[in-house]
Image (tube, rainbow, N blue to C red):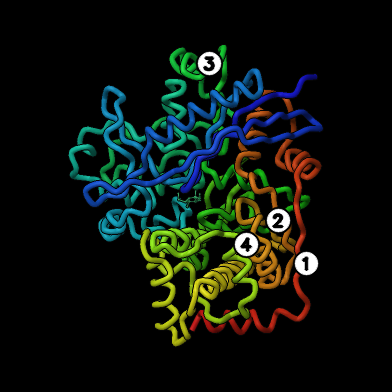
């Protein structure tokens, strides 16, 4: 039987990629056919996504995928979560979606909590508190002209699926990041929506990963040179949900670090954990593919490094990643460590400066050069992974025997080894393109090319992807425990 050919569109905070996946029961080939930068734009003080530029990248990528493969059996889209476009009654997008790193969102947190206390928000939605969750974004947008004119809300992947097919929908895994979805019923949390005085009409019907959303519209076929029909399938449209599908685990005793701009660190569960203890520890229950729960915490991730590189490049300093990592590997461990989740690191801007400031405040000698700054970031991330993996295991009563590190960070050998040492567990690094693979596998299953549950999909991944295992260095525990005590103060 001929393999299925699928285009996986994976949009990250710093770049978008379109991959072609050829999938058969014993075969999974992935190749990148298009990559484009995702550069946020600040206008009049507000940080936006250049959503039409991104959509152009999606169209270019779908065209390239069709050319590369000769035909397409489907298209699936995943992206970062939370952010959305508002559409008016004619279906016209009301302005560029606001970036989750915009400072405006956090201003609305007290107003939301005054109506629904944080304890109750957690019980209903299961989400960790992040100041940029959609529920706060909407409260911050209230009173603006575009909010007044809005009739629909579409999350970023749903917005692109809408432009590609005309479908109006909210894919479940991404809807679960809005703070407005009930983690138990998997429906919109209508009671919260009413109490927060949000128009019910904003929220489209929920679609499950694997559901067919529609087919590429005639103008899209013309634009991309494809012959129809080409179905568009809902995948785990939250990139982290697709990345967790793309974890090549062989049992359920694994933790994952989905490591890109963010590091999403946690475990996969069948049921949410919404205890007060879990809320206070900052754990989230986002929904995954096949009814799973992604029980995890957001760790600030490679953003700390990416934003440092951007700061250095702007100042004319060397910012090449492999050179910085090689230099960091030569710096002694734990020159200084910070808590990567410190809220001061969230917005764009001078990252090395903020890291130095945090070190000084905790009585440490701040990093003295670029290499020490990079080392501080990597040590601090590995420490945060250690804390989070252990806490997740404890809070949900799951034994963890291995840490799967997927996403771009899997290329970073130093970070992978530090993670193994910090966690005291083997780290299986790769695949780098876990999100695109998870995206393609869900499409392939919906198209009848492969069968089974996550276990079977992961078996195919294990048979076909390249991974590298890092064993924890013997005798490392003491120094990591000491560093952990230092960062906690
Ligand atoms: C990762 C991610 C995280 C989400 C953050 C903001 O790309 O999707 O899961 O918390 O971006 O949307």
Q: Which of disc 3 and disc 1 is earlier in sequence?
A: 3
What secondary structure is marked by label 1? loop
Q: Are marks 1 and 2 in contact (CB under 8 Å)?
A: no
Gap between marks 1 and 2 measured at Cα: 11 Å
Mark 1 or mark 2, which has the lower sequence index? 2
Residue 111 percent coordinates (x, y): 25, 57
Any mark on residue 429, and which?
A: 2
Residue 115 visible in this rendered orientation of the protein: no
Q: Dot 1: few (<14), some (14–19), or many (≥20) neighbours within 10 Å?
A: some
* In the displayed structure image, the side of residue 444 where residue 13 appears, left or right: left
Q: Is residue 202 left or right of residue 17?
A: left
Compare marks 4 and 3 and give the one earlier in the sequence: 3
- Whether residue 469 is situated above or below residue 8 in the rendered picture: below
Q: Residues within 10 Å of mark 4 (few under 14, many from 20)?
A: some
- Residue 225 has which mark? 3
- Residue at the location (51% across, 54% down)? 261
Quarter of the picture containing the N terminus is top right
């Amino acid at each position: 039987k001929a393999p299925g050919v699928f285009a996986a569109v994976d949009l990250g905070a710093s770049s978008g990629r379109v991959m072609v996946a050829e999938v058969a029961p014993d075969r999974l080939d992935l190749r990148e056919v298009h990559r484009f930068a995702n550069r946020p734009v600040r206008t009049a003080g507000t940080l936006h996504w250049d959503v039409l530029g991104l959509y152009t990248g999606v169209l270019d990528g779908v065209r390239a995928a069709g050319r590369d493969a000769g035909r397409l059996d489907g298209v699936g889209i995943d992206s970062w979560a939370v952010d959305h476009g508002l559409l008016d009654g004619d279906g016209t997008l009301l302005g560029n979606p606001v970036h989750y790193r915009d400072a405006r969102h956090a201003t609305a947190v007290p107003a939301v909590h005054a109506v629904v206390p944080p304890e109750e928000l957690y019980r209903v939605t299961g989400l960790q508190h992040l100041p940029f969750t959609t529920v706060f974004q909407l409260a911050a947008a209230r009173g603006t002209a575009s909010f007044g004119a809005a009739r629909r809300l579409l999350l970023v992947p749903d917005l692109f699926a809408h432009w590609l097919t005309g479908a109006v929908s909210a894919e479940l895994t991404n809807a679960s990041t809005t703070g407005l979805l009930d983690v138990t019923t998997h429906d919109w949390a209508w009671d919260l929506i009413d109490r927060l005085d949000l128009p019910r009409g904003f929220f489209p019907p929920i679609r499950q990963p694997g559901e067919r959303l529609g087919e590429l519209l005639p103008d899209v076929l013309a634009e991309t040179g494809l012959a129809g029909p080409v179905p568009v399938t809902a995948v785990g449209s939250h990139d982290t949900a697709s990345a967790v599908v793309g974890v090549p685990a062989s049992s359920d005793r694994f933790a994952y670090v989905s490591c890109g701009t963010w590091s999403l660190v946690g475990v996969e569960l069948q049921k949410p954990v919404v205890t007060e203890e879990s809320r206070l520890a900052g754990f989230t229950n986002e929904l995954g593919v096949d009814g799973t729960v992604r029980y995890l915490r957001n760790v600030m991730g490679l953003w700390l490094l990416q934003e440092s590189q951007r700061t250095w490049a702007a100042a004319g300093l060397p910012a090449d990643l492999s050179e910085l990592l090689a230099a960091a590997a030569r710096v002694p461990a734990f020159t200084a460590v910070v808590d990567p989740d410190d809220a001061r690191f969230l917005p764009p801007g001078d990252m090395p400066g903020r890291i130095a400031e945090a070190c000084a405040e905790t009585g440490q000698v701040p990093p003295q050069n670029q290499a020490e700054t990079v080392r501080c970031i990597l040590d601090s991330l590995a420490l945060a992974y250690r804390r989070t993996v252990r806490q997740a295991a404890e809070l949900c009563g799951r034994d963890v025997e291995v840490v799967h590190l997927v996403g771009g960070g899997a290329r970073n050998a130093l970070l992978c080894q530090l993670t193994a040492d910090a966690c005291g567990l083997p780290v299986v690094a790769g695949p780098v393109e876990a999100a695109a693979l998870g995206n393609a596998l869900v499409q392939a299953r919906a198209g009848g090319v492969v069968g089974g549950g996550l276990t079977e999909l992961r078996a195919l991944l294990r048979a076909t992807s390249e991974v590298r295992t890092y064993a924890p260095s013997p005798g490392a525990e003491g120094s990591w425990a000491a560093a952990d005590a230092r960062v906690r103060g």
